Amino acid sequence: MPSPANLLITNARVLTMDQTQPRAAAVAVAGEGIIYVGEAPGAAAFCGPDTRVVDAQGGSLLPGFIDSHCHLRMAAAELANAPLEEVESLEDLKQALQRFARENPAAPWICGSHLRYAILPGGGNPTRQHLDDIIADRPVALMAYDYHTLWANSRALEMAGALHGGRTGPNSQIVMAADGLASGELREPAAYGRVLALTGAWGRAASSLIGVPATSPGPAELAEDRALLRTGLALAARHGITSLHNMDGDSRQMALLTAMEEASELIVRLYLPLSLGPEAPFEALEEAEAMRREQHGSRLRSGFVKLFMDGVLESWTALLLQDYADRPGWSGESLFSLEDFTRLVAECDRRGLQVAVHAIGDGAVRRALDGFEAVQNQNGRRDSRHRIEHIELVHPDDLPRFARLGVIASMQPLHLPTRESDPWRQRAGQARWGHSFAWESLRRAGARLVFGSDWPVVKPNPLLGIQTALGRRPWASGLPDQRQDLAQALAAYTCDAAFAEFQESRKGRIRPAMLADLVLLSDDLESVPIEDMSQTTPVMTVCGGRIVYEA
């Protein structure tokens, strides 16, 4: 007689992502693991007096979603900011900021998130004078949706010592105005970091991204940060996410999350890196190794390093192989030379550390691949699973190199520009559209694709990403069709995402002896029209056998 389950889900459309048993109708869970996958009659043997039985009512049961690229602390911290997603004009911005200021009279800073580029008539961006006209007596810091540009008013620039410009490091800029003072536009973290560092919890959350070390937080600040993280984790669980690949981190963040894990507050698993800049000495990798050693439980792991190769097309900071379509003579810059990137990655690789590198432009993607290839030639081939994050542009010649080098393509469907007027399309130019967000081209070339959100850049809901991946249409006739089918998109959010963090033997599939990381959806995902997929919602999320969200 089998031991009884503590959780039994029946009458489900189980998509196991396991080729040996692709479908089932019932799943039984005991402790942290799965003990049965099969049909309902067989599941009855696992039902005991204390078993919770859940009738899925024909909804899909999937492995818990794995978001392969996010920034949890920043996403949680910016929940307190003014939401600017709907701002289309300067007047919209004025109303949103003044309303937020009225509702938060004691807030020392007026911070906003997700502002679009080119909201001024004629397509310009706001200046410090525009922001001064809206609010002058409090510092204002407004983050672009992509986290690569920040706009600040005069008060914020003065407080950060940036009003008169200054050196910012490679591939970043404090944009100066004709009056000799900063315009208010700060491109890339190296430029806006000293402003963001002053904003409290948001600045602390971004410290490893912006390269400005946060001061040691006091008890009140630690409590605030921990509460924000609990909120962010709860939001992830509500979207059916059971694992997050965080893309910024350091030993302080590791310590905070370790304390939360010990208090059973980590309701979602986290894979945390050490974030490094181009100037980092090899000695810095000792911190990454210490983070890898110090993990204690199954919900918090480390073992990789996150790097930035370039910026984004919207602010002309992505590295391209040829000039920008709307800026002749300029193809962008890189934070790393090929030689410096290769040296750092070779040392990471020698120490057994995985490397994830942000590379948006086709020039940055090629440089990353060149570096990974040089490291492989130098250190020998191993199961490194190095990753390139984003890959918004890729040259056709570089497509087969992902499979040949074993490099993972980590991409975000919701980054896809959906408006004809989006500056991304203008910067790239129509000649590059066929090589943009090339999901299917990469897959056909043998690359292993994993999907994520880049939350808070976009919403963390994996079903929105799946809907985008399935419903994409070419921007012009004759362009390649980059759509994914449902099985491909689900694999990119489950089993292949588990592979990207060396956890394919423990999660990402529904089969006995795997971790019970599950999401039960409100509908049968295979029968939902693509245009209605966003209406499907998780009704239960299970992480390690523990119900962490229930509608």
Image (cartoon, rainbow, N blue to C red):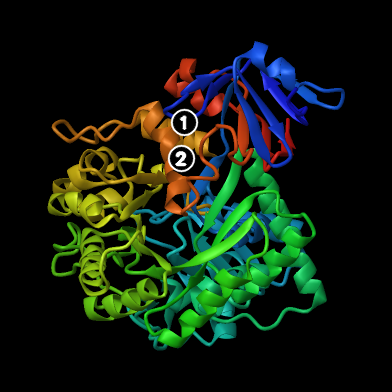
Assess whether mark 1 and mark 2 are in contact (beta carbons under 8 angstroms): yes
Q: Is residue 197 above or below residue 317?
A: below
Which quarter of the figure has residue 77?
bottom right
Q: Is residue 452 visible?
A: no
Give amino acid for label 1: Met
Query: Is 1 on the left-hand or right-hand side of 537?
Result: right
Front-most of residues 511 and 59: 511
Instruction: Give the number of marks.
Output: 2
Between 198 and 267, the one lying in front of the other is 267
How far apart are labels 2 and 1 at the CA level? 7 Å
The residue carrying pointer 2 sits among few (fewer than 14), some (14 to 19) or many (20 or more) residues within 10 Å by Cα, namely many
Classify 10 Å Cα crowding around label 1: few (below 14), some (14-19), many (20 and above).
many
Q: In the picture shown, does residue 167 fall above or below 235?
A: below
Image spot of residue 102 (x, y percent): 74, 58
Residue 58 lies, in percent from the top left, at: 61, 14
Say whether residue 50 is left or right of residue 495: right
Q: Which residue is mark 2?
A: 495
Secondary structure state at the residue bearing disc 2? helix
Q: Which residue is mark 1?
A: 17
Q: Position of residue 277 (x, y in %)?
A: 42, 78
Amino acid type, callout 2: Cys
Please tell me which residue is depicted at 74% across the width and 61% down the height of the picture.
Answer: 260
